[in-house]
Amino acid sequence: MTTENTKKTEEIDLGELLLRLYGFIRRNILIYGAAIIIGGIVGYLIPKTTAVTYSTKAIASIKSIDPNIAKSIIDQFSDFISLEKDYFDSNKETIGNISKLIAEVEYKDEKVSSGTQGDAFLNITVNTTIPVDREVLKNSIIDFFMQNPFIMEESEIFKRQSPELINKYEEEIAKIELLQKESKTHKRNQQVVIENNSKSLNETIIQLFTAKQSIEKQVELFEPVRFVTDFGPFISSKTKGVKYAMMFAALLFAFTFFTTIIISLNRKMKAKNIK
């Protein structure tokens, strides 16, 4: 019987609590409604009263250099934008409207088991005060990157060392081709083995030739950073008005709700002390 009475008391207490909470909200409904409306209006107007920003993104592939060095060069580009806009001369009109530039390194196809990382990419986000020429923006970043002393030195070293590497590839290809010619002089009863060996040698030649062409291409056009995707359309910050309205309405309602509860509890405490 005692257990049943306890359960009933708990149910009654919970029911009473919900009824009191409902009554409390109902008595203050106008205050809460006003808080939601005011919060919504303030949140909606914030993007409109502040300076409108436009953002665009691009992805660049990193080759031949450390990804963190590439990021530091892009960060330096951002510093030049804010401190030395005159550095960019002819592109000053485009660069002058950039308010923020962020670069983040991302690795694709990471190979944790072998301890090596996959291809590295830079995710570049640019905020501007007005939409600017995206091609000029991309070329300005590339030019700044290629004029960096470290990159210029790396380019010279690469171009100086590449001919020796290309010669090595050519020597290996010539050796394998000679081996193929010599293998054809073997006896007929070894023909099956020779054919299988010839296929393997052909694959090796193709791999070496492809690698040689890749080096030659890099010598012709040294690009430690290459844009995989160009900067896309500019997105205005005005589109966030509804989101801010909902967020501020919820925050002001929560603040008002807890404030009214505290005030109500203080009044009850004072009333008890007076009695």
Image: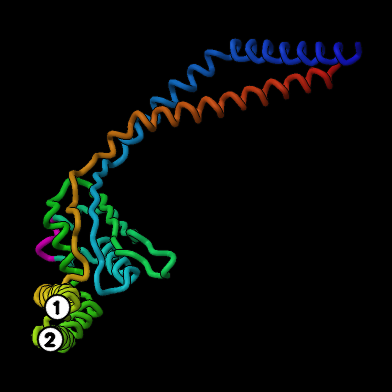
Percent position of residue 166, x then y: 14, 84
Q: Position of residue 97 (x, y in %)?
A: 20, 52
Q: Quadrant of the N terminus?
A: top right
The tag earlier along the polypeptide, 2 or 1, is 2
Contact between marks 2 and 1 (CB within 8 A): the answer is yes
Query: Mark 1 sits on what residue?
Result: 191
**Is residue 92 at least partly visible in the picture?**
yes
Splitting the image into 4 quarters, where does residue 160 fall? bottom left
Name the quadrant containing residue 14: top right
* Residue segment shown in magenta: 89-93
Query: Of helix, strand and loop, which mostly describes the magenta segment?
Result: helix
**8 above or below 136?**
above
Which residue is rendered at x = 42% and y = 70% of the image? 115
Q: Give the residue pinned by disc 2.
A: 186
Verify whether residue 259 appears in magenta: no
Residue 213 found in image quarter: bottom left
Along the line of sight, the residue nearer the viewer: 117 or 230:
117
Residue type pointed to by label 1: Gln
What is the crowding at mark 1: few (fewer than 14 residues within 10 Å), some, or many (at least 20)? few
> Closest to the observer: 202 or 212?
202
How many badges with numbers are in the image?
Answer: 2
What amino acid is at disc 2?
His
Residue 188 in picture, x, y percent from top left: 11, 81
Whether residue 207 is visible here, answered yes or no, is no
Q: In this view, does 71 lie to the left or right of 264?
A: left
